[in-house]
Image (cartoon, rainbow, N blue to C red):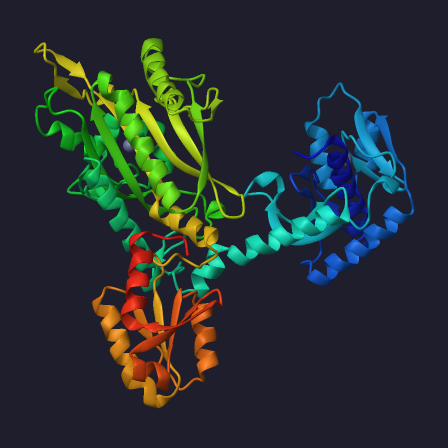
């Protein structure tokens, strides 16, 4: 959280930037310019598109204004005066019209430049360290976020108390940019999005598919070990099922338009739950059959506005690692515990740290208070019994379920929305899901929804950034590059590569005409964990010279010894 002072500094810089832009473009119309988490922005309607050179010029003019030591002066003026004062500023006029009629309008002036503003501001531009801010970028932004209104040009700036803080922030931005999964996804040939296929729909290239298959295999193994049964359900389903589930009523905006099949409306599947419920209901279930844990890598389609789509992180079609647990009330605590065991085991494997949140009953909810109490207490008890630190997210549950949310922290300390575990109080009622109790009566089943990874798209997009593209050996699309020093070593290199391939390692042999150093450089750029250089000495000794992508040189070792080392790293899913 920024201090109050820093917030004032940032917001004041917004005004100074507006003045600078208006001095550069006297015909500019300006929108709004608040302070934000790391700085400030301002929206402008300008006669032409801004260039990076413009930003430099605006920054220069801002520094000149700061040097003048202008005072920020607040005035309260009658509405009519305000309308006159901003007569040639249509966006400001619109804002004034939206303010309550019976209130005076407040403005802030720094010298001749006046802006409509509630404040607060610093006293004088002297309080702002001119070395501790920087203009960062230009982006398009609809006036008032409305796609039907004009698109303005937004200038983002960042500002800090000191130059050191600014430098640290810029360094962090650079690091985040270096890790951007869209750029790495292209460079490492992991995925693409094709405009002719459609926005928000991911094409998994062979490298991406390899990463995904390894994760899915791990996921399947861990679920089988823990008593889950894997299922598949169709990608489309009759609207009938979404009437029963209530999705048509509460989730229609997230669903795609119906398609006609034999006169019946069908929908692309937005959730996997209904299919799993019907599998559960395909038999009469007794108390002895429970719990039943159905799991699916289930692909769903949900509408997201085009402006919100973002690489693999926000998409329109994705595969959830979904599961629904059907259990008796007396089994709930153990089941949730099992979910958390699995969750933390998997997150540890990927090297994430995490924090748990207990999201409780929101204002609008369905179900009885007793049901909520029971479900929420079960979740709380699990967290307490584990001795976990957790935060209560009061009212943060969904309308039909309290839940445990896990927030993940990646290698650069950013947080990601992670696994979630919900106790559903809605669908068991709507679908009338029951089991026969030991008393011979029918009882309502408890249903838990949970995902561990969330979706393959989002999770792997996040992993690319978490690992900065350098996947651990078990996930690396290519694990080993065999690099013959000269043409005469190709034969031996082939033998080595074939042997490792037979041992189930993913190997690439580089027999291009490039020089050795170029080959090593290429393998490093591809983030291949092991590079095996082979020349005369290695061929003679049945050895390989091992280099890691970090540049570390492990020296020569027998092929068998390398194979054992690599397979061990794969087996242990080592973070190397
Ligand atoms: Zn202001
Ligand atoms: Zn579900």
Q: Quadrant of residue 107?
A: top right
How many numbered marks have been drawn onto this rendered protein structure? 0
Residue 461 seen in the current view: yes
Q: Quadrant of residue 257?
A: top left
Residue at (38%, 67%) from the top-left corner? 530
At a point 22% along the width and 36% down the height, the residue shown is: 226
Quarter of the picture holding the C terminus: bottom left
> Going 42% across and 20% down the picture, which residue do you hit?
360
Ligand 1 quarter of the rendering? top right
Q: Nearer the viewer, residue 60 or 348?
A: 348
Q: Looking at the image, is 263 positioned above or below residue 424? A: below
Picture coordinates of residue 177 (x, y %)? 56, 56
Horizontal and vertical percent for residue 45? Answer: 69, 49
Depth check: give the residue in front, 184 or 105.
184
Q: Taking 537 as reference, is 406 above or below it?
A: above
Report the residue that reaches farthest toward the bottom. Answer: 488
Residue 312 seen in the current view: no
- Which residue is rendered at x = 54% and y = 48% of the image? 412
Q: Quadrant of residue 123?
A: top right
Front residue of this view, candidates 102 and 418: 418
Left or right: 124 in relation to 348: right
Residue 550 position in % (x across, y down): 48, 64
What is the x, y in percent for residue 564? 28, 63
**Above-or-below relation of 205 to 94:** below
């Amino acid at each position: 959280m920024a201090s109050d002072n820093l917030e004032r500094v940032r917001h004041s810089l917004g005004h100074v930037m507006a003045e600078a832009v208006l001095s550069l473009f006297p015909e500019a119309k300006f929108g709004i310019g608040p302070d934000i988490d790391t700085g400030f922005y301002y929206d402008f309607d300008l006669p032409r598109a801004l260039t990076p050179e413009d930003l430099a010029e605006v920054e220069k003019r801002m520094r000149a204004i700061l040097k003048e030591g202008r005072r920020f002066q607040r005035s309260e003026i009658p509405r009519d005066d305000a309308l006159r004062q901003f007569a040639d500023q249509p966006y400001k006029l619109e804002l004034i019209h939206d303010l309550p009629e019976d209130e005076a309008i407040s403005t802030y002036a720094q010298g001749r430049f006046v802006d409509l503003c509630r404040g607060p501001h610093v006293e004088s531009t002297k309080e702002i360290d001119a070395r501790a801010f920087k203009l960062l970028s230009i982006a398009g932004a609809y006036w008032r976020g409305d796609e039907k209104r004009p698109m303005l040009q937004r200038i983002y700036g960042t500002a800090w108390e000191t130059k050191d803080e600014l430098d640290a922030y810029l360094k962090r931005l650079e690091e985040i940019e270096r890790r951007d999964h869209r750029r790495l996804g292209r460079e490492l040939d992991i995925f693409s999005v094709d405009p002719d296929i459609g926005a928000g729909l991911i094409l998994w290239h062979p490298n991406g598919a390899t990463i995904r298959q390894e994760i899915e295999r791990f996921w399947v193994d861990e679920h089988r070990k823990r008593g889950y049964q894997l299922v598949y359900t169709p990608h489309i389903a009759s609207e009938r099922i979404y009437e029963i589930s209530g999705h048509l009523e509460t989730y229609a905006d997230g669903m795609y338009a119906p398609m006609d099949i034999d006169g019946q409306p069908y929908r692309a599947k937005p959730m996997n739950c209904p299919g799993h419920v019907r599998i559960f209901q395909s038999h009469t279930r007794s108390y002895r059959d429970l719990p039943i844990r159905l799991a699916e890598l289930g692909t769903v389609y949900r509408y997201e506005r085009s402006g919100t789509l973002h690489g693999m992180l926000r998409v329109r079609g994705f595969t959830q690692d979904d599961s629904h647990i059907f259990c008796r009330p007396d089994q709930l605590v153990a089941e949730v515990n099992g979910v958390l065991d699995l969750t933390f085991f998997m997150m540890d494997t990927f090297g994430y740290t995490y924090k748990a949140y207990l999201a409780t009953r929101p204002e609008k909810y369905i179900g009885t208070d007793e049901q909520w109490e029971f479900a929420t207490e079960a979740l709380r008890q699990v967290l307490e019994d584990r001795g976990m630190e957790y935060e209560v997210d009061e009212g943060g549950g969904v309308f039909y379920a309290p839940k445990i949310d896990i927030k993940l922290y990646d290698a650069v300390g950013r947080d990601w929305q992670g696994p979630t575990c919900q106790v559903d109080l809605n669908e068991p009622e709507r679908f009338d899901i029951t089991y026969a109790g030991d008393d011979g009566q029918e009882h309502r089943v408890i249903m838990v929804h949970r995902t561990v990874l969330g979706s393959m798209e989002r999770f792997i997009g996040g992993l690319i950034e978490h690992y900065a593209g350098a996947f651990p050996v078990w996930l690396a699309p290519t694990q080993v590059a065999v690099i013959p020093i000269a043409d005469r070593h190709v034969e031996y290199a082939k033998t080595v590569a074939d042997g490792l391939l037979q041992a189930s390692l993913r190997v690439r042999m580089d027999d291009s005409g490039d020089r050795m150093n170029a080959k090593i450089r290429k393998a490093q750029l591809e983030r291949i964990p092991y590079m095996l250089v082979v020349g005369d000495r290695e061929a003679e000794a049945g050895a390989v010279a091992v280099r890691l992508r970090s540049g570390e040189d492990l020296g020569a070792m027998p092929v068998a010894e390398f194979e054992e080392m690599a397979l061990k790293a794969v087996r242990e899913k080592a973070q190397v």
